Amino acid sequence: MGNKYEKPFLKSVIFRIDLAQPFRQSEELAADFHKIIKEKFQNKEEIIGTHFEATLGTGEKDKNIVRQRAVTNYKFSDADGNHILLLEFEPPNLNLLFNAYKNSDELKEFVDLISTAANKVYGDIIIKRVGLRYINNIVLSGDAFQWAPFIDSHLISILDFPPEKRSISRGLGRIELVKDSYSVLFQFGMFNPEFPNPIARKEFILDYDCYTNEERSIADVSKTVMALHEEVKRLFESSILDELRVIMGVVKDE
Protein backbone atom coordinates (compact mmCIF):
# COMPACT_ATOMS: atom_id res chain seq x y z
CA MET A 1 0.00 0.00 0.00
CA GLY A 2 1.21 3.49 -0.76
CA ASN A 3 0.91 6.89 0.81
CA LYS A 4 -1.38 9.78 0.00
CA TYR A 5 0.34 13.16 -0.31
CA GLU A 6 -0.74 16.71 0.39
CA LYS A 7 1.46 18.24 -2.35
CA PRO A 8 2.32 15.63 -4.99
CA PHE A 9 4.37 16.49 -8.06
CA LEU A 10 1.86 15.03 -10.54
CA LYS A 11 1.98 16.89 -13.83
CA SER A 12 -0.79 14.89 -15.51
CA VAL A 13 -2.66 11.58 -15.48
CA ILE A 14 -3.90 9.97 -18.68
CA PHE A 15 -6.46 7.18 -19.04
CA ARG A 16 -7.04 5.68 -22.48
CA ILE A 17 -8.95 2.80 -24.03
CA ASP A 18 -8.47 1.64 -27.62
CA LEU A 19 -11.25 -0.30 -29.32
CA ALA A 20 -10.97 -3.55 -31.25
CA GLN A 21 -13.60 -2.33 -33.72
CA PRO A 22 -14.75 1.15 -34.82
CA PHE A 23 -17.35 3.23 -33.03
CA ARG A 24 -20.58 3.80 -34.92
CA GLN A 25 -20.14 7.34 -36.16
CA SER A 26 -23.04 9.77 -35.98
CA GLU A 27 -23.72 13.17 -34.52
CA GLU A 28 -26.78 11.80 -32.70
CA LEU A 29 -24.79 9.10 -30.89
CA ALA A 30 -22.12 11.63 -29.86
CA ALA A 31 -24.90 13.84 -28.48
CA ASP A 32 -26.37 10.89 -26.54
CA PHE A 33 -22.91 10.14 -25.14
CA HIS A 34 -22.51 13.76 -24.03
CA LYS A 35 -25.89 13.74 -22.25
CA ILE A 36 -24.69 10.95 -19.96
CA ILE A 37 -21.33 12.55 -19.11
CA LYS A 38 -22.50 16.18 -19.11
CA GLU A 39 -22.45 16.52 -15.32
CA LYS A 40 -18.65 16.14 -15.42
CA PHE A 41 -17.96 17.42 -18.94
CA GLN A 42 -20.13 20.47 -19.59
CA ASN A 43 -18.43 21.54 -22.83
CA LYS A 44 -18.58 19.74 -26.18
CA GLU A 45 -16.47 20.67 -29.19
CA GLU A 46 -16.20 19.15 -32.66
CA ILE A 47 -12.67 18.58 -33.96
CA ILE A 48 -12.42 18.06 -37.71
CA GLY A 49 -9.53 15.87 -38.79
CA THR A 50 -8.41 14.17 -41.97
CA HIS A 51 -8.11 10.41 -42.47
CA PHE A 52 -5.79 9.12 -45.19
CA GLU A 53 -6.10 5.70 -46.87
CA ALA A 54 -3.42 4.41 -49.22
CA THR A 55 -3.80 1.67 -51.82
CA LEU A 56 -0.58 0.37 -53.31
CA GLY A 57 -0.50 -0.64 -56.96
CA THR A 58 0.15 -4.34 -57.66
CA GLY A 59 1.81 -3.99 -61.06
CA GLU A 60 3.72 -1.64 -63.32
CA LYS A 61 0.51 -0.07 -64.68
CA ASP A 62 -1.26 0.13 -61.33
CA LYS A 63 -0.80 3.41 -59.55
CA ASN A 64 -0.61 4.06 -55.85
CA ILE A 65 -3.80 5.76 -54.72
CA VAL A 66 -4.17 7.97 -51.67
CA ARG A 67 -7.66 8.88 -50.53
CA GLN A 68 -8.56 11.34 -47.83
CA ARG A 69 -11.78 12.19 -46.04
CA ALA A 70 -12.87 14.38 -43.17
CA VAL A 71 -13.45 12.81 -39.77
CA THR A 72 -15.33 14.52 -36.93
CA ASN A 73 -13.95 13.75 -33.49
CA TYR A 74 -15.22 15.21 -30.22
CA LYS A 75 -13.63 16.96 -27.27
CA PHE A 76 -15.46 17.17 -23.94
CA SER A 77 -14.20 19.24 -21.02
CA ASP A 78 -15.23 20.79 -17.73
CA ALA A 79 -15.46 24.54 -17.15
CA ASP A 80 -11.89 24.82 -15.84
CA GLY A 81 -10.23 22.51 -18.32
CA ASN A 82 -9.06 20.23 -15.50
CA HIS A 83 -10.57 17.17 -17.20
CA ILE A 84 -10.52 16.68 -20.96
CA LEU A 85 -12.04 13.69 -22.77
CA LEU A 86 -11.40 12.96 -26.45
CA LEU A 87 -13.69 10.67 -28.43
CA GLU A 88 -11.77 9.74 -31.57
CA PHE A 89 -12.96 7.51 -34.38
CA GLU A 90 -9.85 6.67 -36.42
CA PRO A 91 -8.23 4.91 -34.70
CA PRO A 92 -11.20 4.44 -32.30
CA ASN A 93 -10.33 5.42 -28.73
CA LEU A 94 -11.38 7.36 -25.65
CA ASN A 95 -8.63 9.46 -24.11
CA LEU A 96 -9.08 11.17 -20.72
CA LEU A 97 -6.57 13.75 -19.48
CA PHE A 98 -6.45 14.90 -15.86
CA ASN A 99 -4.75 18.30 -15.65
CA ALA A 100 -5.76 18.37 -11.98
CA TYR A 101 -5.82 14.99 -10.24
CA LYS A 102 -7.23 14.35 -6.76
CA ASN A 103 -7.01 10.65 -5.97
CA SER A 104 -7.84 7.13 -7.12
CA ASP A 105 -11.46 7.51 -5.99
CA GLU A 106 -11.91 10.34 -8.48
CA LEU A 107 -10.15 8.28 -11.16
CA LYS A 108 -12.55 5.38 -10.64
CA GLU A 109 -15.55 7.73 -10.69
CA PHE A 110 -14.55 9.13 -14.09
CA VAL A 111 -13.66 5.73 -15.53
CA ASP A 112 -16.99 4.27 -14.39
CA LEU A 113 -18.89 7.20 -15.90
CA ILE A 114 -17.12 7.00 -19.26
CA SER A 115 -17.38 3.20 -19.45
CA THR A 116 -21.08 3.28 -18.63
CA ALA A 117 -21.76 5.99 -21.23
CA ALA A 118 -19.81 4.15 -23.93
CA ASN A 119 -21.63 0.90 -23.14
CA LYS A 120 -25.09 2.51 -23.23
CA VAL A 121 -24.51 4.44 -26.44
CA TYR A 122 -22.19 2.21 -28.46
CA GLY A 123 -23.06 -1.23 -27.07
CA ASP A 124 -20.86 -3.89 -25.47
CA ILE A 125 -17.73 -2.76 -27.28
CA ILE A 126 -14.53 -4.80 -27.07
CA ILE A 127 -11.41 -3.05 -25.77
CA LYS A 128 -8.06 -4.11 -27.20
CA ARG A 129 -5.92 -1.91 -24.97
CA VAL A 130 -6.37 -0.14 -21.62
CA GLY A 131 -3.73 2.39 -20.60
CA LEU A 132 -3.05 4.43 -17.47
CA ARG A 133 -0.15 6.88 -17.29
CA TYR A 134 1.12 9.01 -14.41
CA ILE A 135 3.68 11.73 -15.18
CA ASN A 136 5.44 13.20 -12.13
CA ASN A 137 7.62 16.28 -12.63
CA ILE A 138 9.58 16.81 -9.41
CA VAL A 139 10.81 20.40 -9.16
CA LEU A 140 13.02 21.43 -6.22
CA SER A 141 15.45 24.19 -5.36
CA GLY A 142 19.18 23.77 -4.87
CA ASP A 143 21.91 21.91 -6.76
CA ALA A 144 20.35 20.59 -9.98
CA PHE A 145 22.18 17.26 -9.72
CA GLN A 146 21.75 16.58 -6.01
CA TRP A 147 19.02 13.93 -5.95
CA ALA A 148 20.49 11.43 -3.52
CA PRO A 149 18.19 12.33 -0.58
CA PHE A 150 15.06 12.22 -2.73
CA ILE A 151 15.28 9.57 -5.49
CA ASP A 152 16.36 5.93 -5.28
CA SER A 153 20.08 5.63 -6.08
CA HIS A 154 19.53 3.18 -8.94
CA LEU A 155 17.51 5.78 -10.85
CA ILE A 156 20.09 8.57 -10.57
CA SER A 157 23.25 6.53 -11.20
CA ILE A 158 23.35 7.56 -14.88
CA LEU A 159 24.01 11.13 -13.76
CA ASP A 160 27.25 10.03 -12.06
CA PHE A 161 28.78 8.67 -15.26
CA PRO A 162 30.02 11.89 -16.95
CA PRO A 163 33.10 13.32 -15.20
CA GLU A 164 31.68 16.83 -15.59
CA LYS A 165 27.99 16.92 -14.69
CA ARG A 166 27.58 20.53 -15.76
CA SER A 167 27.93 19.43 -19.38
CA ILE A 168 24.87 17.15 -19.22
CA SER A 169 21.98 18.46 -21.32
CA ARG A 170 19.67 15.48 -20.78
CA GLY A 171 19.86 12.29 -18.72
CA LEU A 172 17.04 9.77 -19.08
CA GLY A 173 16.54 6.08 -18.33
CA ARG A 174 13.95 3.60 -19.59
CA ILE A 175 12.75 0.30 -18.13
CA GLU A 176 10.09 -1.94 -19.66
CA LEU A 177 8.34 -4.56 -17.53
CA VAL A 178 6.12 -7.43 -18.67
CA LYS A 179 3.63 -8.70 -16.10
CA ASP A 180 1.07 -11.51 -16.40
CA SER A 181 -1.77 -9.33 -17.67
CA TYR A 182 -0.16 -5.96 -18.44
CA SER A 183 3.08 -4.18 -19.29
CA VAL A 184 4.82 -1.09 -17.88
CA LEU A 185 6.98 1.49 -19.61
CA PHE A 186 8.86 3.44 -16.93
CA GLN A 187 10.89 6.49 -18.00
CA PHE A 188 12.87 8.57 -15.53
CA GLY A 189 15.59 11.16 -15.24
CA MET A 190 16.31 14.77 -16.12
CA PHE A 191 14.40 15.67 -19.27
CA ASN A 192 15.54 19.32 -19.26
CA PRO A 193 12.92 21.66 -20.80
CA GLU A 194 15.78 23.90 -22.01
CA PHE A 195 17.46 21.13 -24.06
CA PRO A 196 19.92 21.24 -25.87
CA ASN A 197 21.34 23.73 -23.38
CA PRO A 198 23.09 22.20 -20.35
CA ILE A 199 20.82 21.36 -17.43
CA ALA A 200 20.26 24.35 -15.14
CA ARG A 201 16.99 23.44 -13.39
CA LYS A 202 16.48 20.89 -10.64
CA GLU A 203 13.71 18.82 -12.26
CA PHE A 204 13.30 15.04 -12.32
CA ILE A 205 10.72 13.02 -14.26
CA LEU A 206 9.06 9.83 -13.01
CA ASP A 207 6.80 8.67 -15.85
CA TYR A 208 4.84 5.41 -15.45
CA ASP A 209 2.83 4.11 -18.41
CA CYS A 210 0.89 0.88 -17.65
CA TYR A 211 -1.13 -0.85 -20.35
CA THR A 212 -2.82 -4.10 -21.35
CA ASN A 213 -2.72 -5.78 -24.75
CA GLU A 214 -5.44 -8.40 -24.31
CA GLU A 215 -9.02 -7.88 -25.45
CA ARG A 216 -11.65 -7.37 -22.77
CA SER A 217 -15.21 -6.15 -22.39
CA ILE A 218 -15.95 -2.50 -21.61
CA ALA A 219 -17.48 -3.80 -18.35
CA ASP A 220 -14.02 -4.97 -17.20
CA VAL A 221 -12.26 -1.64 -17.75
CA SER A 222 -12.82 -0.17 -14.28
CA LYS A 223 -11.35 -3.20 -12.50
CA THR A 224 -8.41 -3.21 -14.91
CA VAL A 225 -7.66 0.47 -14.35
CA MET A 226 -7.57 0.07 -10.59
CA ALA A 227 -5.11 -2.82 -10.94
CA LEU A 228 -2.88 -0.61 -13.11
CA HIS A 229 -3.19 2.17 -10.53
CA GLU A 230 -1.93 -0.16 -7.79
CA GLU A 231 1.10 -1.05 -9.90
CA VAL A 232 1.96 2.61 -10.50
CA LYS A 233 1.59 3.36 -6.80
CA ARG A 234 3.97 0.51 -5.90
CA LEU A 235 6.58 1.63 -8.44
CA PHE A 236 6.36 5.26 -7.35
CA GLU A 237 6.93 4.39 -3.69
CA SER A 238 9.94 2.30 -4.75
CA SER A 239 11.34 5.25 -6.72
CA ILE A 240 11.39 7.90 -3.98
CA LEU A 241 13.00 8.36 -0.56
CA ASP A 242 11.77 9.77 2.74
CA GLU A 243 13.07 13.32 2.27
CA LEU A 244 10.86 13.71 -0.79
CA ARG A 245 7.92 12.26 1.15
CA VAL A 246 8.48 14.95 3.80
CA ILE A 247 8.38 17.67 1.13
CA MET A 248 5.17 16.28 -0.38
CA GLY A 249 3.58 15.79 3.03
CA VAL A 250 2.18 12.36 3.86
CA VAL A 251 -1.52 12.68 4.66
CA LYS A 252 -2.39 9.08 5.46
CA ASP A 253 -1.93 5.51 4.30
CA GLU A 254 -4.45 4.42 1.70
Image (spheres, rainbow, N blue to C red):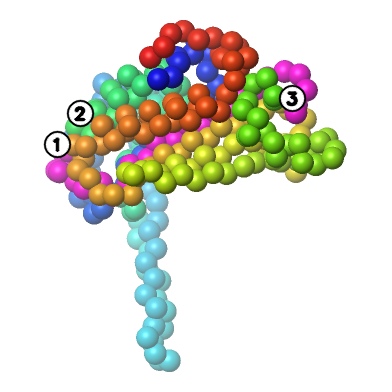
Earlier sequence position, callout 3 versus callout 2: 2
Q: Secondary structure at mark 3?
A: loop
| Residue wearing tag 3 | 146
Distance from disc 3 to disc 1, alpha carbons, whole Å, reads: 52 Å
| Residue wearing tag 1 | 120
Residue 101 rendering spot, x and y as whole percentages: 43, 21
Point out the frontmost of discs 3 and 1. Answer: 3
**Which kind of residue does numbered mark 3 sit on?**
Gln
Which numbered marker is on residue 37? none
Determine the residue positioned at 38% across, 14% down.
254
Characterize the local packing of mark 2: few (<14), some (14-19) or many (20 or more) Cα atoms within 10 angstroms: some
In the rendered image, the vertical position of residue 173 relative to residue 147, given as above or below: below
**Which kind of residue does numbered mark 2 sit on?**
Ile
The answer to which of 165 and 101 lies nearer the viewer is 165
In the displayed structure image, the side of residue 35 where residue 99 appears, left or right: right
| Residue wearing tag 2 | 36
**Quadrant including the N terminus:** top left
In the rendered image, the vertical position of residue 244 relative to residue 25, given as above or below: above
Whether residue 7 is visible to the viewer of this picture, yes or no, is yes
Residue 36 rendering spot, x and y as whole percentages: 20, 28
Distance from disc 3 to disc 2, alpha carbons, whole Å, reads: 49 Å
Whether residue 81 is visible to the viewer of this picture, yes or no, is no
Question: Which image quarter: residue 145?
Answer: top right
Earlier sequence position, callout 1 versus callout 2: 2
Q: Secondary structure at mark 2?
A: helix
Determine the residue positioned at 55% across, 21% down.
9
Point out the frontmost of discs 1 and 2. Answer: 1
The answer to which of 160 and 43 lies nearer the viewer is 160
Q: Start and end of the magenta stretch?
A: 118-146
Distance from disc 1 to disc 2, alpha carbons, whole Å, reads: 9 Å
C-beta proximity under 8 Å, tags 1 and 2: yes
